[in-house]
């Protein structure tokens, strides 16, 4: 499987054609190791009597309050990668989801069958990005059906797609060479599934979503909220003027500046 560099334009072409791409070289691997340890260190405290989902969400809530999360989400290469898809005004949808796929796990929540994420509330202009914090093996990664997004929204009954693309000329690909630090990006119409669980290895990953702040959000996205990873030049100008009403001469005779706590988003 080819892996792309965050600035490689060829990745976007591949995404358009196949509906997914895998990147490496986005994150510092020490940061990836630190986040992996953070997550693993909290698993024992949560496991007693808790389902996987509740555990993963509890750990995500903790991680989001940690400086590790800030460093991770504001990684320059992550922003560069996202810009290729949605432009400079980037909304990182709140509530990323941790997946902790333990060996031999049988919880159906952790073994997702073939699905398109659009069906669960994500918008068609929203892009998925899953960061791996462990290597995957032949059994515990993700699988995709390349090109499935180009068939549009597919009929579903009780969460199950009603047309089996695999019986209609499409082939599944097991993305079994993903390594810790890799990021898998996919379209919200791309059919994907959990490959399964390994007899020996744990897989840790975080699924995230991003889109342009300038496009419509679905009801779910509006409810979840987002954090801005970047603001484009035209919105930057409006922020200098001070408001979207473009009131004349607001700063005449004074200084044209942007709030200091927004420097991270707007730049210096
Ligand atoms: O991690 C997995 O196995 C499934 C993830 C998934 O379907 C998603 O994040 O949308
Ligand atoms: Fe999914």
Image (cartoon, helix red, strand yellow):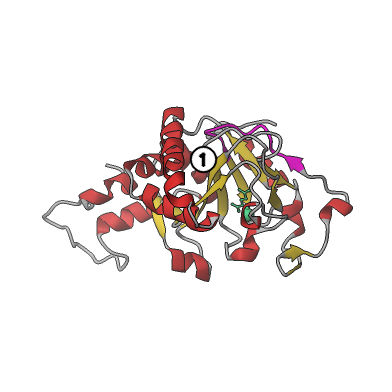
As rendered, which of 234 and 225 lies closer to the eye? 225
Looking at the rendered structure, the secondary structure element under dot 1 is helix
Residue count near mark 1 (Cα–Cα under 10 Å), binned few <14, some 14–19, many ≥20: many
Split into 4 quadrants, where in the image is the N terminus? top right
Query: Does residue 136 lie above or below 252 as drawn?
Result: above
Identify the residue position indicated by label 1 in the image.
81
Whether residue 134 is visible to the viewer of this picture, yes or no, is yes
Looking at the image, residue 256 sits to the left or right of residue 191; the answer is: left
The one of 263 and 69 positioned closer to us in this rendering: 69
Q: Quadrant of residue 199?
A: top right
Mark 1, ligand 1, within 8 Å: the answer is no
Q: Is residue 95 left or right of residue 179?
A: left
The image position of residue 191, as x and y in percent, is: 71, 53
Magenta residues, dominant SS class? loop
In the image, residue 141 above or below residue 220: above
Nearest the eye: 130 or 106: 106
Write the residue at 69% across / 38% down.
Answer: 175
Residue 174 on the magenta segment: yes
Q: Position of residue 237 (x, y in %)?
A: 32, 53
Q: How many marks?
A: 1
- From the top left corner, tell me how far across and down residue 218 is, in percent: 53, 68
Task: Assign the C terminus to one quadrant of the image.
Answer: top left
Q: Position of residue 208 (x, y in %)?
A: 51, 50
Tell me the magenta residue range. Answer: 173-183
In the rendered view, tell whether residue 15 sits above or below residue 246.
above
The stretch drawn in magenta includes residue 39 = no
Q: Residue at x 68, y 35 (%)?
A: 176
């Amino acid at each position: 499987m080819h892996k792309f560099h965050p600035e490689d334009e060829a990745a976007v072409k591949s995404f358009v054609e196949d509906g997914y791409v895998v990147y490496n070289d986005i994150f510092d691997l020490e940061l990836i190791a630190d986040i992996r340890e953070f997550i693993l260190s909290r698993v024992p405290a949560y496991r007693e009597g808790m389902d996987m989902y509740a555990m993963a969400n509890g750990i995500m809530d903790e991680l989001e309050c940690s400086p590790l999360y800030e460093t991770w989400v504001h990684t320059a290469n992550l922003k560069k990668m996202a810009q290729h898809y949605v432009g400079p005004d980037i909304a990182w949808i709140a509530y990323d989801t941790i997946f902790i796929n333990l060996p031999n796990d049988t919880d159906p929540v952790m073994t997702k069958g073939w699905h398109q994420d659009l069906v669960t509330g994500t918008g068609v202009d929203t892009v998925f990005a899953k960061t791996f914090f462990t290597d995957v093996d032949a059994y515990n990664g993700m699988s995709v059906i390349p090109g499935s997004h180009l068939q549009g929204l597919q009929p579903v009954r009780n969460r199950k797609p009603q047309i089996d693309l695999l019986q209609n000329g499409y082939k599944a690909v097991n993305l079994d060479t993903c390594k810790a630090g890799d990021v898998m990006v996919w379209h919200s119409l791309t059919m994907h599934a959990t490959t399964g669980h390994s007899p020996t290895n744990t897989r840790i990953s975080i699924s995230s979503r991003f889109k342009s702040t300038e496009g419509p959000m679905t009801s779910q996205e509006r409810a979840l909220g987002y954090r801005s990873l970047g603001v484009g030049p035209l919105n930057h100008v409006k922020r200098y003027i001070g408001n979207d009403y473009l009131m004349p001469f607001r700063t005449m005779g004074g200084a044209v500046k942007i709030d200091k706590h927004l420097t991270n988003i707007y730049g210096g």
